[in-house]
Amino acid sequence: MKKLLALLMAFALVFSFAACGGNTEETTAKNEETTLSGEETTAATPENPVIRMSTTTSVNDSGLLPYLLPVFEGKTGYTVEVQSAGTGAAIQKAKDGNADLILVHSKASEEEFVNEGYGVERLPFMYNYFVIVGPEDDPAGIRDSENAAAAFEKISSQGAKFVSRGDDSGTHKAELKIWGEEVPDAATDTWYISAGQGMGACLTMANEQDAYCLTDKATFLSNKESLPGLDILLAEGEDMKNTYSVIECNPEKLDGVNTDGAKALIDWLLSDEADALIAKYGEEQYGQALFTVIEE
């Protein structure tokens, strides 16, 4: 009887271990499936987990980076430290060795950054448009202008107030290009206000002073509720296209560059997943996407 009981217990143990083994395989399969789907999984921390991005204010102030980066961080285990300033200042931070990559919007400055050996390759990947905003009653009558240059000429001839970034940012460089040889002098042209500040501050000034202002469309729309006195008066002219590029800092020129991290973030920003996220950013809140992906 004891032998029979022992034999039955042995069989019970065998079946128990088999059942446990089956559950373990099933759990492992589920975990692998979860990992591949990118859900409910925290990626392993990379050897050098911090990526320093020096970027223009528009992609940060518009909310695009706060929308994109948590997805990248969750998938890779990296942490992205964002430093935002005007394009000139953003590029200088990188030249000073305080960034691993830059995301800016001034083609000439970007090409210079690469040609001087600070950057590896300029990679344009999305665009939006600059717009001219101003008082709804449009005192200078720019609303039906053929392009931004024609609108600026009307503003100048009427002496209507205009707030300029005046800070060597990508937006400021775009503004100067539109003015051409007729750039106003804030010292003598009292209607022209050179703020030397970021886009948000300039829009606030324009709102308070019933002035015109050149801004990227994304930043304006994301701040529109606090700017009741301003409307978009001219948009999407060919001379107002605003292209954004990402550039890896060159480790052969600069010390301490997190090359693996910079490459990982750039690869992701150029991926189909990021493209899809960028393409729909703003649609729900503003009824339109704020940025357009450049198709290869």
Image: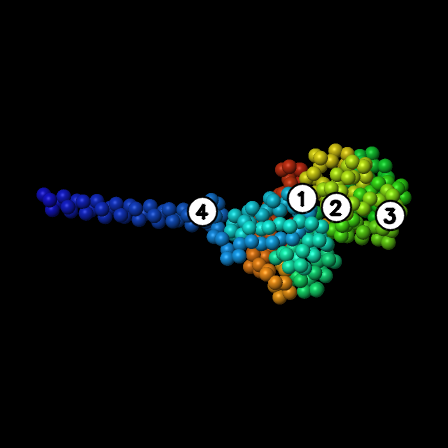
Q: Which is more N-terminal, label 4 or label 3? A: 4
Q: Give the camera-side residue of 159 and 49.
A: 49
Checking the image for residue 61, the label placed there is: 1
Would you call the spot at circle 2 few (<14 residues within 10 Å), some (14-19), or many (20 or more)?
Answer: some
Direction bottom: furthest residue: 252
Residue 64 in which image quadrant: top right
- Count of marks placed on residues: 4
Q: Are marks 2 and 1 in contact (CB under 8 Å)?
A: no
Checking the image for residue 34, the label placed there is: 4
**Quarter of the image where the C terminus is located:** bottom right
Q: Which is more N-terminal, label 2 or label 3? A: 3
Assign a secondary structure to mark 2.
loop
Residue position marked by numbered label 2 in the rendering: 197
Checking the image for residue 187, the label placed there is: 3
Q: Amino acid at mark 2?
A: Gln
Marks 4 and 1 sit apart, C-alpha to C-alpha, by 33 Å
Marks 2 and 4 sit apart, C-alpha to C-alpha, by 46 Å
Q: Nearer the viewer, mark 2 or mark 1?
A: 2
Residue 181: where, in percent of width, then height?
Answer: 86, 54
Assign a secondary structure to mark 4.
helix
